[in-house]
Image (cartoon, rainbow, N blue to C red):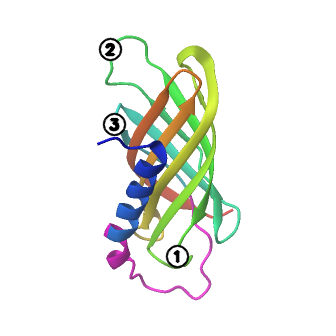
Amino acid sequence: MKFTIASLISIGFACTVAITAPMSAFAQEKNPQPLNYFGVGASNRGAAIESKLSINNRFSVRPTATTKLFEEGDRHATIYVPVTYDFGQTSSGLRPFIGGGAGITTENRQFGGVLTTGADYRINKRLTAVGSVNLGLFEDNRDFSAVLGVATNFNR
């Protein structure tokens, strides 16, 4: 069975929404602020640094950097800067997202695009759990990363 990149991303996003929708109940805040965070995590290859800067209640910029710690040879880094659409309410504990943007990899110094999907789960006022799947579209290769992490929240 042959899958295209678009169909794999669609399937991944649909699974993310289906799995996380039942868990979206969260205590409502009176004046919810858009969530901003900075955190660390693990990817399918090694370490990851994740962040989120809210533009407004629906759109965010999510810079992410991953390193290839678990592969032999040179240690390469990949940096993605996607703009995402955040589903759900600002006060909701669970917020799925989808988006795209630019990426760069130190492997052969290539620029390209990135498609991303995932979800944030606000654990409490200070911490957020983050999960995302990224597909880097570079000239010579496709870079897939799955990232899970924990971040500390801050207000702008």
Report whether residue 2 is seen.
Answer: yes
Disc 1 marks which residue? 88
Q: Residue 15, relative to residue 102: is it above or below?
A: below
Q: Is 4 above or below relative to 119?
A: above
> Where, quadrant-wise, is the N terminus in this rendering?
top left
Labels 3 and 2: the sequence-earlier one = 3
Q: Secondary structure at mark 1?
A: loop
* Residue type for callout 3: Asn
Label 1: few (<14), some or many (≥20) within 10 Å? some
Vertically, is 90 above or below 132? below
Q: Which mark is residue 32?
A: none
How far across and down, in percent of the image, does residue 57 sit? Answer: 65, 72
Q: In terms of secondary structure, what is the magenta stretch mainly?
A: loop
Q: Quadrant of residue 64?
A: top right
Direction left: furthest residue: 1
Real-space Cα separation, disc 1 to disc 2, in angstroms: 41 Å
* Residue at the spot of label 3: 44
Q: Position of residue 86 (x, y in %)?
A: 57, 66
Q: Which residues are magenta?
A: 19-36
| Dot 2 crowding, Cα within 10 Å, few <14, some 14–19, many 20+ | few
Q: Quadrant of residue 90?
A: bottom right
Mark closer to the chain start, 1 or 3: 3
Numbered circle sitting on residue 72:
2
Give me the residue at 59% from left, 79% from top.
32
Q: Is residue 51 shown in magenta?
A: no
Kindly state the secondary structure of the residue where label 2 is placed. loop
Distance from label 3 to label 2 (Cα)? 14 Å
Q: Amino acid at mark 1?
A: Gly
Q: Are marks 1 and 3 in contact (CB under 8 Å)?
A: no
